[in-house]
Image (spheres, rainbow, N blue to C red):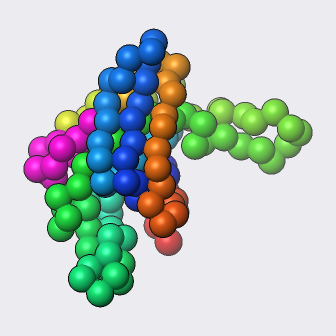
Amino acid sequence: MRALIQRVSQASVEVDQKIVGSIQAGLLVLLGVEDADTAEDQDWLIQKILKLRIFGDEEGKMNLSVTDVSGGILLVSQFTLHASTKKGNRPSFIKAGKPAFAEEMYQSFLEQLRQQSGLSIEAGIFGAHMKVELLNDGPVTIWMDSKNKE
């Protein structure tokens, strides 16, 4: 399971010219699922996201989590996080989860995130063509991969 996490001042996602999710200060999380992902991958990633200390404290140091600042989270599915560009110029998405499995994992991730965080959690629509708008704060952008826990 892969996530691209961006600290934002605001973010929104639009489907068919309608805003389906938006937050003010918090995190935009782009989530990619692969077929090898498990509940353990999901749990690890959720805990890392909720505890990631990338918000400024009273001294301006990145020392607070999204939970500490009562920020929002906007979760957007993004199979392209599993793109392979090893050969040629056209990305391969062979590692991306098959749609039924990926949607199940995405929905489970969303539900667990809501249950465990107590924060305002918004989301895009799985499989839809989405337009994501964000104002990256910092900029702060963090990459996480549950199969490569650096």
5 is higher (above) or lower (below) than 112: below
33 is higher (above) or lower (below) than 19: below
13 is higher (above) or lower (below) than 139: above
As for residue 118 lying within the magenta part, the answer is yes
Q: Which residue occupies the foreground of this view, 80 or 147?
A: 80
Q: Which residue lies at the image location 66% right of the left edge and 33% below the top edge? A: 93
**Is residue 36 something that shows in the picture?**
no
Location of residue 6 in the rendering, given as x and y in whole percent from the top left corner: 45, 55
Which range is magenta?
112-122
Location of residue 29 in the rendering, given as x and y in whole percent from the top left corner: 40, 47
Q: Is residue 4 left or right of residue 18?
A: right
As for residue 2 lying within the magenta part, the answer is no
Q: Which residue lies at the image location 27% right of the left edge and 36% below the top edge? A: 122
Q: Is residue 126 left or right of residue 112?
A: right
Instruction: Name the outermost residue toward the top.
Output: 16
Q: Which residue lies at the image location 46% right of the left edge and 44% below the top edge? A: 134
Instruction: Name the outermost residue toward the bottom.
Output: 59
Location of residue 146 in the rendering, given as x and y in whole percent from the top left corner: 44, 57
**In the picture, residue 120 is in which quadrant?**
top left
Q: Looking at the image, how many numbered discs can be counted on the residues?
A: 0
Q: Which residue lies at the image location 36% right of the left edge and 23% below the top edge? A: 19
